[in-house]
Amino acid sequence: MRRLAFFVLLTALSHAGFVGGRISVSLCALGEGASALAVGVLMSLYAVMPMLLAVQAGRLVDRVGAFRPIAIGGATVAAGTLLPFAWNGLPALFVAAVVVGSAFMVQHIALNHVIGSLGEATQRPVNFSWFALGYATSGTLGPLLAGFALDYAGERAAFVLLALPPAVGTALLLWRPSLLPPAQPTRADAAQHRLADLLRNPRLLPVYLFSALLAAGWDLYTFVIPVYGSSIGLSASTIGIIMSSFALATFVVRLAMPMVARRLTEWSVICAALLIAGLAYALFPLAKAAPLLMAASFLLGLGLGCAQPMIMAALYAASPPGRQGEVVGVRTTMINASSTVMPLGFGAVGAALGMGPVLWTMAAALLAGSWLARRRIRPA
């Protein structure tokens, strides 16, 4: 349990800097006069290198273990978050997006590998539930820190504050590397590591596809709320509070996930998550005031927050031996491919037609996904 708590803490520290920095970057870009399309491009840069390199990063974790990817990834997240402090202007924001997105991807894959290797297989859904709770905690605190730091301390100070959590996490790992589970590096040749084998795996493929759809709903939220909130005149701190209500909901639902995991099948949870998220997105175009946006955000957080632990447990259970990092890397590639294309497409549509059509489209996709996932439910 001590090991699990340690790596949940590391996850929360790094993710707080990542999510807070991502929101700060988008709000600073809007403050520089960037259009919705330009902000979409900026947000997509967080996903470009993860999309291209996640499979290789997963294989690296399988080969060398988790210590170096976690340590170097965390230090680079901190350094990348500091870039806009040292270098003003839109170019710094674009470079920071690439650096931070890439580094966090490597660290995320390695931390998933560690969590999956702790304890017995029957404990895995509970472990991933606590892991997801760490993300929910940092997802609540990161936007609050970003919003209030931007409003009351200024842009440069905000990026310094947001670089501190991942730096502290890296220092903790360097202080206590013995808490890592024993490394089991693999040296299988490339012929044994064919990507097509994973994509044809009947247990993995459905999880990949529904995971990508849920992640698309998550990523669209982080893109659309700063733009939509700014368009209706909300301040940075108000937008931060709205986004923290989303993260608070993920925290609340993940507190219950260890109990839920013992009573419901993975696909029951995924189906419910898609349904709730779809309904929440359908409400956003109707919300024109901060309290209504907070309520819709909270509902969306309940939906999206409950699925990730079950998805990660299912992925790890279905992974071929010695390829757990690669399996997570494939999922990361698929998610980030969507994250790269979606902000560009939705940014273009939003600039031309407004955010309403963007939100309705996502609602329809999630509701359709819920109907498809329902067909996979089996009795617990």
Image: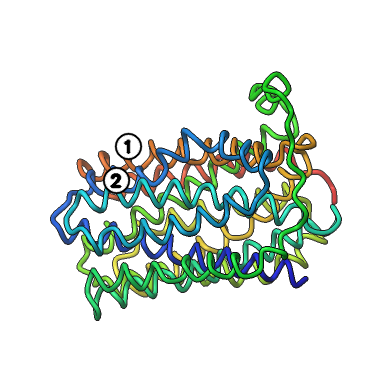
Residue 345 circle label? 1
Left of 87 or right of it: where is 282?
A: right
Q: CA distance from mark 2 to mark 1?
A: 8 Å
At x 29% / y 45%, what residue is drawn? 40
For this orientation, the residue located farthest to the left is: 33
Q: Residue 111, located in which quarter of the rendered image? A: bottom right
Left of 280 or right of it: where is 187?
A: right
Q: Amino acid at mark 1?
A: Gly
Percent coordinates x, y for residue 330 in the rendering: 59, 35
Query: Nearest the camera: 20 or 302?
Result: 20
- Vertical side of 51 occupied by 148: above or below: below
Q: Which residue position holds label 2?
A: 40
| Category of crowding for the residue at label 2, using alpha-carbon neighbours closer than 10 angstroms: few (below 14), some (14–19), many (at least 20) | many
Q: Amino acid at mark 2?
A: Gly
User: Is disc 2 in contact with disc 1, using a CB cutoff of under 8 Å?
Assistant: yes
Which marked residue is nearer to the observer: mark 2 or mark 1?
A: 2
Secondary structure beneath label 1? helix
| Category of crowding for the residue at label 1, using alpha-carbon neighbours closer than 10 angstroms: few (below 14), some (14–19), many (at least 20) | some
- Vertical side of 124 occupied by 370: above or below: above
Query: Nearest the camera: 366 or 236?
Result: 236
For this orientation, the residue located farthest to the bottom is: 152
At x 23% / y 43%, what residue is drawn? 37
